[in-house]
Image (spheres, rainbow, N blue to C red):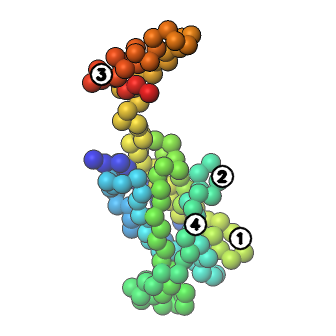
């Protein structure tokens, strides 16, 4: 059963003052997840300095961060003039239970001087958590005066296969 469905990534407009290039490789387009967690992976190459970390942000609140230090030798070959491109990767597991069932959040890069640059918006839907017993249990409280037969009544009720008596 799918717990997180239809993850989509929309890349933000590239800010050439701060970022040379970036990519979000995971989640893939319309990816589903059998668990409530999913992987975000990619890379970002800063123009003047390397990105320090990547943040998942929703409604102005930082939900999760990941260091930008993953080895990406193919990115170093693509940007030989940028010495930090070889360590431009990031990867994190995000718990979708931190969000509403239909969610969207921003993925942004943070540089050493606290400059934040949007990288992408990730949207998805997760299955609601439900209690399997919540719809089957219908509590009933029996009260009475002492020595009026309630113990006997509870024993009789407990004999029924669909009644839990305590």
The tag earlier along the polypeptide, 2 or 1, is 2
CA distance separating discs 4 and 2: 14 Å
Q: Quadrant of residue 75?
A: bottom left
> Residue at point 43% right, 69% down?
41
CA distance separating discs 3 and 2: 56 Å
The residue to which callout 2 is attached is 60
- In this rendering, the answer to whether 137 lies above or below 124 is above
Q: Relative to residue 47, is residue 85 drawn left or right?
A: left
CA distance separating discs 4 and 1: 14 Å
- In this rendering, the answer to whether 157 lies above or below 62 is above
The residue to which callout 3 is attached is 159
Measured from the top left, where is residue 163 in percent x and y? 34, 23
CA distance separating discs 2 and 1: 15 Å
The residue to which callout 4 is attached is 65
Measured from the top left, where is residue 43 in percent x and y? 47, 74
Badge 3 marks a residue whose secondary structure is: loop
The tag earlier along the polypeptide, 3 or 1, is 1
Evaluate if marks 3 and 2 touch, with contact meaning CB atoms under 8 Å apart: no
């Amino acid at each position: 059963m799918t717990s997180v469905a239809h993850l989509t990534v929309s890349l933000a407009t590239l800010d050439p003052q701060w970022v040379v290039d970036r990519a979000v490789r995971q989640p893939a387009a319309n990816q589903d997840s059998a668990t409530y967690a999913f992987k975000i992976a990619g890379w970002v190459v800063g123009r003047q300095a390397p990105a320090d970390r990547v943040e998942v942000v929703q409604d102005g609140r930082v939900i999760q961060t990941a260091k930008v230090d993953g080895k990406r030798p193919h990115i170093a070959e693509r940007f030989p003039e940028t010495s930090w491109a070889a360590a431009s990767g990031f990867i994190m597991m995000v718990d979708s239970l931190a969000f509403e069932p239909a969610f969207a959040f921003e993925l942004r890069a943070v540089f050493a001087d606290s400059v934040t640059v949007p990288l992408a918006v990730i949207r998805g839907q997760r299955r609601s958590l439900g209690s399997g017993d919540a719809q089957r249990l219908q509590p009933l409280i029996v009260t009475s005066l002492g020595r009026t037969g309630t113990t006997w009544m509870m024993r009789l009720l407990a004999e029924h296969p669909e009644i839990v008596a305590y």
